[in-house]
Image (tube, rainbow, N blue to C red):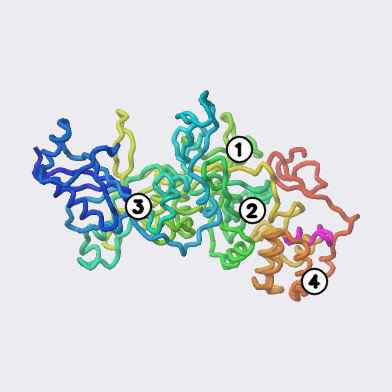
């Protein structure tokens, strides 16, 4: 018989381990459990089995004798599990450096609900929805009866998700699966989500700072990477094809890669239980230097203005996108497929950048101790498509870095590998920077699942995939259906934003179409950033309200009363005269082969020379 054993204890707080001796009494064991969890206002029962049919009571018998008395076959060897049942959440969990237990796998801890956190509207809507899915009765029994074939199921039911080909839980389904149900949400004290931390806790008073000292209190736990089973966004939808056509026109004209930020809104979706869809309404392109094989993103002096504009319009920064195109040498109208299962889907460098953006734009969550958990920020990649072994046109793919990956990047633990794009390097600890041990699970040559030290780490462990596509029913919230206003920061290909261009853009619209004219995201950005007439955000408040509500009367009223707008009109002069009925030049048409926008008079595409 071993001199010391480990008994695992499963509670709503997570899983814990307690060190005991065979000679310890049952009373001693229960006392150690009570030291672990505060029982003062929380009646707790300890059971020997998962079914919770055999409750443990205090006695002077040893653990060994207790097991023999109740079940001859029972023996408390390392890893035996006890189960706790408590109807009120424990107030605290004591963690001491020399405690007689080892705390493991704790996704939650007790907390007071952070009611002051204003979550996104979509989260507030989904929180009120039921986590139970009613199924249609397909049985022979009466309506008043239920069987296993017609009983309601939970949104996180594995078989249900498999039938619908859903690979990931939605974030709200993940919350419900881990105890954030209707009863929990109605109580004052709930479990909290604990974020992965890969950094040393600063200002530990027990020793000198690293590297002179470190202890279990301030040292981050080793990280074992797992494929994340949930995602914060379940689908990315482009509102209309013109948004992408306008963005791709830069590459067709220059063959230089391009990046931009996605703006839009989140909405509930029904295809994934309690799922969230990101709907892209506009793309903003910050200052950048583009090359045929990469991009240098420059500092943007207007980033704050663009963010404030989006907020006034009811939009959120949904994510970022970039191109990775390579022309097919045999057919310039096609693109070479460079991203697939045999190469890489998202490179380590791109993954690290995406994680930095996700850390910059966290997801508000009242179940987290600091009010944030994860991120809804997505990464959209545009590259060459491969269909039936042949190169085709543009392919869309969307990703999110896992919470573990974001934590490793926040702690500066990862670097892209020089040898392979789909591998990341784990930094080594230095005298100024501590890096925890990082592991990942894989299979050996005998197909056994093993844990491997991550010197080089496959990037696939760091992200989740997200479906992406065009909306079935297109809408044009902030995109003109006429010739679009020139996009910002494109002077390198001759697309300047100036007064003359404003006049040419305005000529397309009749006097009654003023709201349509100003309902262009790039035009509104120009109004706020031009140097001829300075518009402050408050100057456009009424106009932005009209655009977000699509209120033409309010927009017309603003145009008549705004002193700065009339000054702007006078500056433009005759170029601003509205289009006459007989002065129609026609709307541009998008090529079905390469999506380039052509003038109405063109019979063939200017870019790929294919017929309309």
Q: CA distance from mark 3 to mark 1?
A: 54 Å
Nearest to viewer (mark 4 / mark 2):
4
Nearest to viewer (mark 1 / mark 4):
4
Give the crowd class for mark 2: few <14, some 14-19, many >=20 residues within 10 Å.
many
Q: Earlier in the sequence, mark 2 or mark 3?
A: 3
Q: Label 1, secondary structure: give it.
A: loop
Q: Label 2, secondary structure: give it.
A: strand
**Which residue is located at x 71 percent, y 39 percent?**
592
Q: Is residue 332 magenta?
A: no
Q: Which residue is mark 1?
A: 329
Q: Earlier in the sequence, mark 4 or mark 3?
A: 3
Q: Is residue 508 magenta?
A: yes
In the image, residue 169 lies at what x, y percent? 46, 42
Q: Which residue is mark 3?
A: 108
Q: CA distance from mark 4 to mark 2?
A: 28 Å
Q: Earlier in the sequence, mark 1 or mark 2?
A: 2
Q: Earlier in the sequence, mark 3 or mark 1?
A: 3
Please state if 282 lies on the left or on the right of 111 as rendered: right
Q: Which residue is mark 2?
A: 281
Nearest to viewer (mark 1 / mark 2):
2
Q: Earlier in the sequence, mark 4 or mark 2?
A: 2
Q: Are marks 1 and 4 in contact (CB under 8 Å)?
A: no
Nearest to viewer (mark 2 / mark 3):
3
In the drawing, what numbered circle is on residue 605? none
In the image, residue 589 lies at what x, y percent? 76, 46
Q: Nearer the viewer, residue 368 or 56?
A: 56
Q: CA distance from mark 2 to mark 3?
A: 36 Å
């Amino acid at each position: 018989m071993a001199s010391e054993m480990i008994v695992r204890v499963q509670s709503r707080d997570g899983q814990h381990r307690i060190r005991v001796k065979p000679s310890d009494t049952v009373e001693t064991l229960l006392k150690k459990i009570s030291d672990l969890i505060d029982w003062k206002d929380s009646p707790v029962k300890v059971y020997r089995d998962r079914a919770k049919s055999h409750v443990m009571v205090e006695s002077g018998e040893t653990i060994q004798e207790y097991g023999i008395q109740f079940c001859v076959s029972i023996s408390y060897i390392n890893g035996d599990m006890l189960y706790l049942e408590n109807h009120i959440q424990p107030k605290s969990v004591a963690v001491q450096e020399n405690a007689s237990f080892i705390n493991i796998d704790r996704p939650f801890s007790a907390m007071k609900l952070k009611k002051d956190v204003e979550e996104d509207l979509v989260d507030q809507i989904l929180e009120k929805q039921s986590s139970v899915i009613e199924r249609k009765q397909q049985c022979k029994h009466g309506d008043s009866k239920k069987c296993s074939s017609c009983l309601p199921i939970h949104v996180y039911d594995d078989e249900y998700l498999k039938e619908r080909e859903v690979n990931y839980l939605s974030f709200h389904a993940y919350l419900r699966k881990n105890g954030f149900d209707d009863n929990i949400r109605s109580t004052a004290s709930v479990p909290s989500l604990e974020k992965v931390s890969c950094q040393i806790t600063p200002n530990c008073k027990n020793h000198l700072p690293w590297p002179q000292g470190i202890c279990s209190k301030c040292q981050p736990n080793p990280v074992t990477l797992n494929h994340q089973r949930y995602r914060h966004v379940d689908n990315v939808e482009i509102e209309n094809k013109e948004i992408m056509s306008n963005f791709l026109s830069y590459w067709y004209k220059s063959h230089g890669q391009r990046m931009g930020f996605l703006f839009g809104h989140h909405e509930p979706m029904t295809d994934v239980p309690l799922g969230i869809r990101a709907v892209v309404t506009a793309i903003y392109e910050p200052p950048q230097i583009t090359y045929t094989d990469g991009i240098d993103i420059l500092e943007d002096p207007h980033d704050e203005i663009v963010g404030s504009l989006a907020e006034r319009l009811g939009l959120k920064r949904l994510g970022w996108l970039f191109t990775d195109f390579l022309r097919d040498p045999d057919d310039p109208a096609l693109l070479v497929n460079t991203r697939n299962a045999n190469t890489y889907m998202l490179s380590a460098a791109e993954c690290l950048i995406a994680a930095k953006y996700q850390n910059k734009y966290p997801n508000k969550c009242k179940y987290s101790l600091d009010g944030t958990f994860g991120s809804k920020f997505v990464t959209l990649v545009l590259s060459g498509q491969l269909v039936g072994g042949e190169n085709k046109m543009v392919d869309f793919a969307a990703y999110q870095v896992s919470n573990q990956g974001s934590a490793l990047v926040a702690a500066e633990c990862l670097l892209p590998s020089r040898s392979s794009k789909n591998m990341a390097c784990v930094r080594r600890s230095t005298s100024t920077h501590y890096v925890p041990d990082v592991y990942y699970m894989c299979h050996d040559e005998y197909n056994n699942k093993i844990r491997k030290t991550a010197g080089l780490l496959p990037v696939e462990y760091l992200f989740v995939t997200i479906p992406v596509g065009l909306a079935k029913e297109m809408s044009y919230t902030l995109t003109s259906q006429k010739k679009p206003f020139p996009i910002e920061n494109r002077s390198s290909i001759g697309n300047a934003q100036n007064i003359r261009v404003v006049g040419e853009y305005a000529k397309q619209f009749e006097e009654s179409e003023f709201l349509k004219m100003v309902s262009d995201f790039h035009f509104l950005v120009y109004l706020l950033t031009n140097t001829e007439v300075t518009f402050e955000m408050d100057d456009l408040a009424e106009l932005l309200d009209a655009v977000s509500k699509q209120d033409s009367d309010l927009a017309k009223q603003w145009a008549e009363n705004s002193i700065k707008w009339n000054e702007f009109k006078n500056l433009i002069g005759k170029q601003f005269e509205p289009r006459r009925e007989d002065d129609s030049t026609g709307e541009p048409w998008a090529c079905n082969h390469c999506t380039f926008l052509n003038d109405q008079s063109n019979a063939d595409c200017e870019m790929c020379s294919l017929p309309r």
